[in-house]
Amino acid sequence: MLVYVGVGCNEGERFVNLIRGIRFIAKRYVILAVSSIYRTKAVGFKGRDFLNAVILLRTYDNPFAVLSYLKTVEHLLGRRSNDPNRPFDGDILLWENLYLESPILTVPHPRMYLRAFVQIPLMELFKRGFPTFGYKLRTFADVGDVVKVVDGAALQLLAVD
Ligand code: AMP
């Protein structure tokens, strides 16, 4: 299955944490694409700006196993429950043609439509030819707060060991 995952960080060495989180994900799943990294204002609380990106991965796990692994990575990087600030956050955005509503997991991610910092990196991957699964992206009148800070191409180079 192909899955889009949103990743973000607003604590500590943000760029390092984001890359560490992506590398932890890559230990278990094949990462097929990584968007550019964008800096955005914290939504819904006062905190440091976030760095956000979207990755596309391939998995043979079920959605709950992927969610559980993302939570493991969040905790490995120091995430505390009840704190909106986070050294790493991973959310399942789209999972091929799956629609799922359960108490712990909703796919597509219920708030992704509201978030320019998700739609913009996702659009970047769609434009590069990765699958849309029929998902229609929203265009935002005002994306002033979402600033590209690392271009996708540069990121691919950084991923080389
Ligand atoms: P967050 O604060 O973004 O890490 O998400 C809090 C909770 O949202 C998690 O503990 C999940 O159980 C739940 N959740 C529901 N749908 C999703 C999804 N698509 N991806 C990630 N978490 C989800």
Image (cartoon, grey):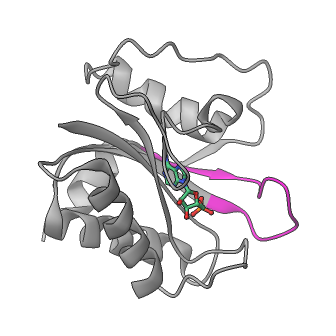
Q: Quadrant of residue 95?
A: top left
Number of numbered callouts drawn: 0
Q: Viewed as shown, does residue 141 lie left or right of 149?
A: right
Residue 151 horizontal side relative to residue 58, left or right: right
Q: Which of 157 and 104 is in front in this view?
A: 104
Question: What residue is at 62 percent from the left and 41 percent from the top?
Answer: 117
Tell me the chief SS of the magenta region.
loop
Residue 73 versus residue 5 in the image, above or below: below
Rendered-image quadrant of the N terminus: top left
Q: Where is residue 154 in the image (x, y as percent from the top left)?
A: 32, 51
Return the residue nearer the eye: 7 or 161: 7
**The image quarter in which residue 129 lies:** top left
Does 150 appear in magenta? Answer: no
Residue 26 in the figure: left or right of residue 123:
left
- In the rendered structure, does residue 38 fall within the stretch colored magenta? yes
Give residue 77's position: percent from left, percent from top: 45, 84
Quadrant the C terminus occupies: bottom left
Please tell me which residue lies in front, 127 or 147. 127
Q: Can residue 130 be seen in this view?
A: yes
Residue at far front of view: 103
The image shows residue 61, relative to residue 112, as above or below, that is below
Coordinates of residue 146 in the picture (x, y in percent): 68, 41
Report the residue at 79% width, 53% height from top.
Answer: 43
- Splitting the image into 4 quarters, where does residue 131 fall? top left
Task: Looking at the picture, tell me which residue is in the foreground, 101 or 22.
Answer: 101
Q: Tell me which segment is drawn in magenta.
A: 36-50
Question: In the image, is 148 to the left or to the right of 100?
Answer: right
Residue 80 image position (x, y, % from top left)? 61, 85
Answer whether residue 150 is visible to the viewer in this image: no
Q: Which image quadrant shows ligand 1?
A: bottom right
Q: Residue at x 62, y 17 (%)?
A: 138
